[in-house]
Image (cartoon, coloured by chain):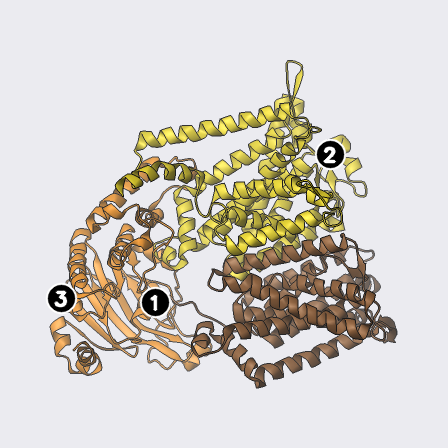
Chain colours: A orange, B yellow, C brown
Amino acid sequence: MSEQKTKLLVEHVTMQFGGVVAVNDLSMEVHEGEIVAIIGPNGAGKTTAFNVITGVYAPTNGRVSFDGSCVVENYPHGKMKKSYLGANGDMFHEIKEPTPDKLTALGMARTFQNIRLWKSMTVFDNILIAKHMKRSSNLFSAAFRLNSAEEERHRAEVMDLLRVVGLEDEKDDLATSLPYGKQRRLEIARALATEPSLLLLDEPAAGMNPQETGDLTQFIAQIRKDFNVTILLIEHHMDLVMDISDRIYVLDFGRLIAHGTPDEIQRNEKVIDAYLGVVEDAED
Amino acid sequence: MIENKSQKRKNAWIAFLCVLAFLALIFCLDQWIKPTDKLGMLLIVLQKGSVYALAAVSMNLLNGYTGLFSLGHAGFMLLGAYTYAIFTIPDKSRDAVYQYFDAAIRFSIPEKLSQHMGGFGTALGVFIALVLAGLVAALMAWLIGLPVLRLKSDYLAIATLGFAEIIRAVFQWSKLGPITNGSNLLKNFARASKFKLEIAGTKLSLSTFVPVLIATVSITLIVLIVNSTYGRAFKAIRDDEVAAEAMGINLAKHKMIAFVTSSFFAGVAGATLAMVLSIAQANNFKSAMTYEILLMVVLGGIGSITGSVIGSLLFVAASEWWLRGLDSGKFLGIEAPNIFRNGFRLVVFSVIIMIVVLFFREGIMGEKELPDLFRKKKKDPAKEAQS
Amino acid sequence: MDVLKTTLPYIISGISVGGQYALIAIGYTMVYGILRLINFAHGDVFMVAGLMMVYLSASLPLYLSIPLMILLTVLLGFTIERVAYKPLRSAPRMSVMISAIGVSYLLQNLALYITGGLNKNYPQIPWISDRISLFGMETSRVTVITPFLTIVLVFALVMLINHTKIGMAMRAVSRDFETSQLMGIQINRVISATFIIGTFLAAVGSILFFTNYPGVVPTSGAMPGLKAFVAAVFGGIGSIPGAVIGAFIIGIAESVIKGLDTILIVNGVISEQIGLATFSDAFTFVLLIIILVFKPTGLFGEKSTDKV
């Protein structure tokens, strides 16, 4: 594993909202080509971690590096410094708070827990807009159609993508008119349209039945192969996680309590106590 | 890929020819109808209607397409109107216009150009002044946008409204009198009623044609922008800002593009308004004007350019022409001078608007455009056959 | 000392104007706190209150016309909410704001129709319209009364909000609309109560405001309305003390700028009038933009974070 290239490196990230510590001193590493899952009970801080990694929130403390270069870094200052109790308060010195779009340009793309498609637009347009970032045209050349070659190329690419995710028949439907499972797929396809090297999926199987979850598991594995992406996902469906993850990180109350391969995690006492036991009980 | 390339090109040609035919019709109306005729009102409605249509469409680009609720439109129109007026007042009228001040800017672009190029120079000068009007408004929008566009919905609305009021106060300030003529009005500049085309000794009126032409060209440009990749990005921001940003759309940049573009056309609309009304006075560009334009957009349907055009034409026609009788004692044959007196028209009118706002929230067009209507008609029989 | 002496009269009249704005601003801030709506029609309700006073006092004695005017204004505020805002409860916020603009347009046009666009002289109200002299300057008694009356009314309002059941419901609704609905608070009653209080204060404010002005025209409400709203934003929208302090700041700033030319000439800074009074309205908006850029939540506003 040591010879693998590091895709994403999270170092001592802490995120505090007022008095609530949503993520506490989280460190993790994702290697190129891996599928890594973050699991944990509700409110464990998984989505907050995602939001820090993708630049939505600036962390209170910590650093995120992508492809070997630092993209997010912050350290507590002023009032925060006093109230911040972490051990790594002095470790970071730079402030780097890029907006999500800049990180997407670097090759990070994500989906959302509560599907965020563009409601008034068709399936096709939803993906086409994700290509906007790749445009070389400015307002004038776009308005006067001087970029028609690029436009045609992007439209063809969108069609290819739709075919891969199996949505080509619905391309002219409104995005929100799709059944739930397909909306999830569309959101993944939209993220893929930005040509990412790291794909972050926030609970892709939420609200799905076992049949749909099974399909999704295959779909994610296929994506990794076809698009050559590294995948970091948050998920509650243990079948899916254990099936496709190379490694798993377990969060509880904002803290990392364990990490390892699916086998290791399934055997980890701490995890079973904090999390798996509860879920299995609930599912029985 | 519903339509292949040749089909697309064909549609573009059809649209282009329709626009040409429409402009030709306006040109003919301009000759047939004399301002003193009974139908003279039609010309006035077309002139004012086209100005407001442009203003409404440019506001729709921002409020409807990008989802930025801005209420500064009157301010940008004011900038456009003044820029246009100041740079087209002929030299010899300047001292008469600036009665109380020593005019600082002493050249008229159309006049200068006509000295070298004749009639074409005048037209070119008017065109340059119009573009300049748009650019001044756009530049101001850029300056205002830097701090203001970060604000969320209602705060943005109130901040832009505030900027429009500040602009109005600055233009009325007596210390700027040599440029803006203080709180006095500007007049005698190049105006629509004076536009004539002289061919072989016959003078052809252009007083309606020119404003309609300006509005048509500008609205066409806006349609091209809306249908481009940038227009789609604007809609993405409106539908879901967070998702748009996550998909690599730079929010600050795109909001600024929408704001500046919208203001550019608002400036052009302001200039055209001055051209049509023959005067420019800061006091006319109050927030009430912004509200009226907003109501036109709502009437037509937020998010539809066709709707904005129809909405503003109806708005102008109803308030200037069809409902006139409500103000002058006789309406639809009913005579009731006690009720139908000055101002009743506007009361009826605002009640109609409230009904639209409350019960027909989609407006006339919803989010549909003109081509959608044709497409639907074609599709319907097919659907019926299926079922 | 000279600076103070020349500025003082403007500050005093500014405090008075500020008190009037405060009474209007409370209506804005309470409605915004609960419905997240900029009630653009509030300033016009204020104007209508002025007009009603003009018409009522023409045929009724003051001790009848004043209470009747307040009652009718409150009824108007209540009706506007029920007719124009309640049907849009689940609509996007922009729709409700547009509806408010529509109501404002309607009220102004209605006033234009009824008055014929003429300036209507506001009735002389004995005692409060009397001229008195204060620090060697001539003013009407209302100038002195306004700030005190404002403080008393605001104090009563704060007591109401903190110590009554309906006040508690208001606080709950402004904190979390949906949850308070689930907790069994009758949302429509709370909203109506908010509008009733807001318009009541605006009606009282209209008496104080128009007594100092020559008359009422259909657009009389627009500018005070906007300024009161700015005051509410300035103080942190949703916060009543914030709105009051914001209103006093804006009233004083406006009044001082109106006399700034004179103040500067007397103090030898400039030698002739430079027309700074033109900016007395615009300066309000300068303040607004400054506060929005540097502290978007206003002086006393609460911070809210968006959830992704």
Do marks 1 and 3 share a subunit? yes
Determine whether label 1 and label 3 are within 8 Å by CB.
no
Q: Quadrant of residue C151?
A: bottom right
Mark 1 chain: A
Q: How far apart are the alpha carbons under marks 3 and 2?
A: 80 Å
Disc sitting over residue B56 in the figure: none
Would you name the residue on which mark 3 appears? A243
Where in the figure is residue A56, as x and y percent of width and height? 37, 64
Q: Would you identify the image quadrant in which residue B204 lies? A: top right
Query: Which chain does tag 3 point to?
Result: A
Front position in the image: A233 or A23: A233
Q: Is residue A102 left or right of residue C34?
A: left
The label number, if any, that marks residue B188 in the structure image: 2
Q: Is residue B8 left or right of residue B150?
A: left
Comparing labels 1 and 2, the label whose residue is closer to the camera: 2
- Type of the residue with mark 2: Asn
| Residue furthest to the bottom | C163
Question: Looking at the picture, does residue A203 appear above or below residue B380?
Answer: below
Q: Is residue C133 above or below residue A165?
A: below
Which residue is the site of mark 1?
Answer: A52
